[in-house]
Image: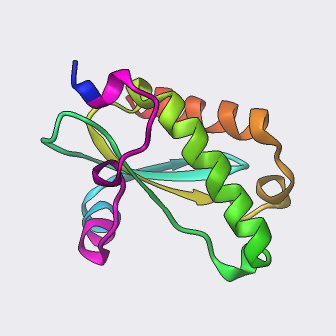
Amino acid sequence: MHAYLTDQRLRKDERLLTKADFDRVFNGGQSAGNKRLIVHWLENSLGYPRLGLVVSRRFGNAVARNKWKRRIRDIFRRHKQAAGSRDIVVLPGKRDEAKHADHNELKEALLGLLRRTA
């Protein structure tokens, strides 16, 4: 087990930061979704998962977008083991359920998608 999976921090190298990383996942990966989230993923050879987030301005104002991103990052860092060794990009679903979902609903949605994609 990789050392990153045992702690609950989200380190900089556990995040997708460049456009090339995002493009690689979007173009070469697979996707799944539910009412609240859409997940794109691609296997990596790093031994630990990496997370990327994409939230459009149509989702809401900056406060709403940042609140959604904080929640997803928190869920991801606490449940890294469920992600395996993949690059994952998470987007909010297009329905209003994504905007109005609380932390527990987002947690169930994300973990359900990660289980489904394993």
Residue beneath the point at 73% across and 76% down: 62
Q: Quadrant of residue 22?
A: bottom left
Q: Nearer the viewer, residue 116 or 55?
A: 55
Answer whether residue 5 is magenta in the image: yes
Residue beneath the point at 60% across and 47% down: 72
* Total numbered badges shown on the rendered structure: 0
Quick one: quadrant of the N terminus? top left
The magenta span reads: 4-23
Q: Looking at the picture, how far across and down is residue 50, in whole percent?
A: 34, 47
**Which residue sits furthest bottom?**
57
Query: In the rendered view, would you say 24 is above or below 76?
Result: below
Quick one: quadrant of the C terminus? top left
Q: Quadrant of residue 7?
A: top left
- Give left or right: position of 28 versus 34: left
Residue beneath the point at 68% across and 65% down: 66
Answer whether residue 39 is magenta in the image: no
Query: In the rendered view, would you say 56 is above or below 34?
Result: below
Query: In the rendered view, would you say 77 is above or below 68?
Result: above
Color scheme of the displayed model:
rainbow
Q: Looking at the picture, how far across and down is residue 64, in whole percent?
A: 78, 67
Q: Looking at the picture, how far across and down is residue 30, in whole percent?
A: 36, 51
- Give left or right: position of 85 versus 96: left
Residue beneath the point at 70% across and 68% down: 65
